[in-house]
Image: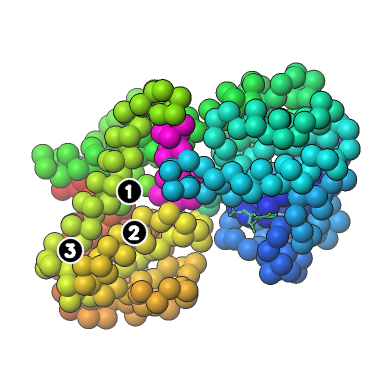
Amino acid sequence: MSISVGVVGAGYVGLTLAACLAELGHQVMCVDSDGSKIDQLNQGNSTIVEKGLPELIRSSLESGRLHFVLGSAATVVDTEIIFLCLPTPMSETGAADTHLVVEAIRELAPVVAAGTIIVNKSTVPIGFKDVAVAMIGRSDVHLVSNPEFLREGTSVSDFLNPDRIVVGADSAEVAQRFLRLYETIDAPVVITDPVSAETIKYGANAMLAARLSFINSLAHLCEVVDADIDDVLRGIGFDHRIGSELMSPGPGWGGSCFPKDTAALLQTSRQAGFDFPLLAQVIDSNHAQIDHMVNRIEHAAGAPASGATIAALGLTFKAGTDDLRGSPSLEVLDRLIARGASVRAYDPTHPTLGANRMIIGADPYEICVDADVLVVLTEWPEFSSLDFRRIHGLMSSPNIVDTRNILEPIALRDIGFTYVGTGRN
Ligand SMILES: NC(=O)c1ccc[n+]([C@@H]2O[C@H](COP(=O)([O-])OP(=O)(O)OC[C@H]3O[C@@H](n4cnc5c(N)ncnc54)[C@H](O)[C@@H]3O)[C@@H](O)[C@H]2O)c1
């Protein structure tokens, strides 16, 4: 069954959604206020690095099932189901700034046809649905909360093979009508009320952030008791209640979602009268991990960092994406720059970078010339197969700090490097 769908916002979520729904056979109109983005998409070029996305965009444009249009929410007024995939960045208070979603609902409410389903995919504060329903002010227009759980880097496969589909709706009839969109997807479906759906989204991200903070703290403990975090996590991960996914230490968690969603959940919770001290600790512990990494790198560079040359591998917040938003790599490097270090960085998805605070190298070897320390900040797989003998010859001091534990310490020490991992002995 082909359904006419509007998607407002062609970013990470909206673009993946639009291309995947078109792939499932629906007729999709995707609107964005950024003209250059729309031009690029209409030429069949993806605006983000995501595996499989360029192919889906091109095939859906060719089949005529996908259209990209410049405009605002009302541009997709004639579609049956309208998804809002607009940014909800962190405001100064820590709360999610919903003004773009509010504007879109205000624009759509008076003009959509009776029976239209407006679906919120943006991550909005718990209870936002009541605000939205009041703004719509029409009993013949329905609001559904359908939070998105895709992981950047694997967004297409996550969308087409999701762990679950969550639908928050006020009536079973609306939920079922909405779910026709996903009828060819084989996944568990959680149908609930909109407030619970909003809470599921925040709860999931907060729990994942908590897991990462715990792993990073455990890695820190390994450093002080001389245990090996890789073995420790392997031993823990075989417990099926815990599992082995998302089990690597790193420089701290980041990205476009975890920092803002944990802050927003904490803010909502406090406003509702529950302090949620554990969540506050999860956030604080992440700041402490970033501090710890900065200190370790400075130490490896022969502290203080002032005057040291640091070569950095990886700028994105994780591998497989070109997204720099909330990247712990950038935070670590900016702090080192603030301490007087000069930084040269390489990332496969960023041959250039707007800001001139650091030099961006064309290849991973160029940045190593005369460097005092080489730091791995993003887990791009290609970094583990670099020619480290060549790198050893290029650096002024052969120091490596591998915040992601993707390199082979024994092989590197054999070459002559001083190697420091995270929680590794
Ligand atoms: N990125 C993720 O991995 C992810 C995962 C799950 C949920 N989310 C949530 O989904 C929402 C969107 O996130 P994103 O990462 O896709 O954001 P994004 O910034 O990548 O994309 C938003 C898009 O909306 C467009 N836009 C802004 N204002 C507009 C307007 N008035 N009319 C039309 N288009 C407009 C922007 O040009 C941009 O292309 C956020 O609430 C986010 O928290 C994101």
Drawn side of residue 279 relative to residue 353, left or right:
left
Drawn side of residue 147 relative to residue 103, left or right:
left
Determine if the magenta segment contains residue 55.
no
Q: Position of residue 171 (x, y in %)?
A: 75, 19
**Which is in the foreground here, disc 2 or disc 1?**
2
Mark 3 and 1 residues: CB-CB less than 8 Å, in contact?
A: no
Determine if the magenta segment contains residue 258.
yes
Q: Quadrant of residue 132?
A: top right
* Residue depicted at x 48% and y 47%: 90
Q: Which residue is mark 2?
A: 331
Q: Is label 2 in a helix, a strand or a loop?
A: helix
Label 2 vs label 1: CA separation? 10 Å
Looking at the picture, does residue 5 appear above or below residue 183?
below
Instruction: Name the mark on residue 252.
Output: 1
Q: Quadrant where the N terminus lies?
A: top right
Q: Which residue is mark 3?
A: 298
Label 3 vs label 1: CA separation? 17 Å
Give the amino acid type for the residue marked by disc 2 in the picture: Glu
